[in-house]
Amino acid sequence: LIGALADRTTLAFGRRRSWMAVGVPIAMAATYFLLNPSPGTSALYLLLWLVVFYAGWTMVFIPHQTWGGEMTGDYHERTRIAGFRETGSFVGYLAASLVPLLYLQVYLGKTAPTFEEIVKTIGWFFVIFLPVGVLWCFLKVPAVKAAEGEKLPSWTQLFAILKRNKPFARLVTAYFIDRVGMGTYFFVQPILVMFALGMPQYLLWIGLANTVSAVLFSPLWVPVARKFGKHRAYCLANGVTILSYLLLFVAQPGDLWIVVLANAVMGLGNGGTMITPPAMAADTVDHDELQSGVQQMGGHMAFLAFVFKAGMAFGPLIGASCLAFFGYVQSGQALDERGMLGIRICATVLPIALLLVPMAMMWRFPLDSARHAEIRRMLDARRSA
């Protein structure tokens, strides 16, 4: 809904900036009420403010994703923009992990901060720096305004995207399966590390290796995509992620260095699978505009964000079902050899099987640099006419 509404916004302030400006105070206010419930607060109160928070955050996130795709029509430059943006996202994840450690443990000297203290620290970090980051974006990035005489899409054309735009439908289907695999792994990972590998004390550090690797190595996927094409870079990134799962499968209890290495390799792969899909989605918008005569960048990016979240949400269901099949029911239970093997299979073999599907779907993706350049020439000729 937010993506479609942003596509239909014609305010002089900018169709993307307008929604982000509205979303920031909504997300900030909801964060305050979520982090400061009164005694006896009901679940309904928390649900209400959680919905308000995600409504506000969506007003920021979807237009921001869309804005990057609209800054240029160049095939390779879109990948570079997405590379910088997603690297920024990984830096944000890293900051969210480090801020509680630095503030509570280093600055305040709390050796064992409570869960409440950690969550509130992250929450205030968000409330302070979200408006700062968005304001900086407004000052430094040119606004996207509706062109004079531009034809705005009708509401019936929103869902027609999935039927009409075949390359985009292939992309979002592949990305959904890819994210299901990732969601499956992240659900089973704590169980693998704590019970199958016997390293609960290193759980947070292992996760940190993944994020630090993504921050450092994500920019490498920009030249890879330039050389081989975005769709091939996406497949290669999934191949790197598969390698990390194989390392985890052979890791034995106490093999901390293998587990850390596997998560560092996974961070490298994750960088590629986060950068290339938004860049490819922006290219499919041009394909769709050539067919329909209207540009729906916000609608396309909203669908992409939806399948990302849907896949990550569906993954835990797959992971839990897999664990139950091998007899794992709850944490702390005594595990036999079958249960231990089952945890490994659910955390590694199952995600590998899932990732092979999007790799097969995207290897021969039809929108390469040559085809996209042809589409842009036809769009430019139409706009000139």
Image: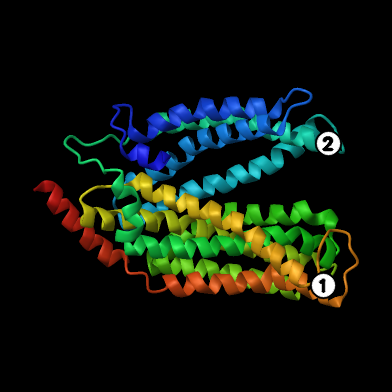
Q: Secondary structure beneath disc 2? A: loop
Q: Which amino acid type is marked by label 1?
A: Gly
Which of pointers 1 and 2 indicates the residue nearer the eye?
A: 1
Whole-percent x and y of residue 27? 55, 30
For image coordinates 72% across by 25% down, the residue present is: 37
How was the colour assigned to the protein in this rendering? rainbow
Q: Which residue is drawn at 55% across and 51% down?
A: 309
Going by the image, does 141 lie left or right of 189?
left
Q: Where does residue 366 sit, x and y in percent of width and height?
A: 32, 69
Residue 250 quadrant: bottom right
Q: How many numbered circles does the render carry? A: 2
Report if the CB atoms under discs 1 and 2 are less than 8 Å apart.
Answer: no
Q: Which residue lies furthest to the left in this view?
A: 385
Circle 1 residue = 339
Closer to us: 315 or 203? 315
**Residue 264 seen anywhere in this rendered image of the structure:** no
Q: What residue type is labelled 2?
A: Pro
* Left or right: 120, with 339 as reference point: left
Q: Does residue 38 sit above or below 73 in this rendering?
A: above
Q: Residue 113 carries which label?
A: 2
The CA distance from mark 1 to mark 2 is 34 Å
Q: Where is residue 240 in the image (x, y as percent from the top left)?
A: 57, 69
Q: How crowded is the residue under tag 2: few (<14 C-alpha within 10 Å), some, or many (20+)?
A: some
Numbered disc 1: secondary structure: helix
Q: Is residue 24 visible?
A: yes
- Residue that sits furthest to the right in the current view: 334
Q: In this view, does 366 lie to the left or right of 361?
A: left
Residue lying at 36% horizontally and 42% vertically, measured from the top left: 4
Q: Which residue is drawn at 33% across and 60% down?
A: 163
- Comparing 142 with 278, the one in front is 278
Give the numbered dot on residue 46.
Answer: none
Q: Which of marks 1 and 2 is nearer the N terminus?
A: 2
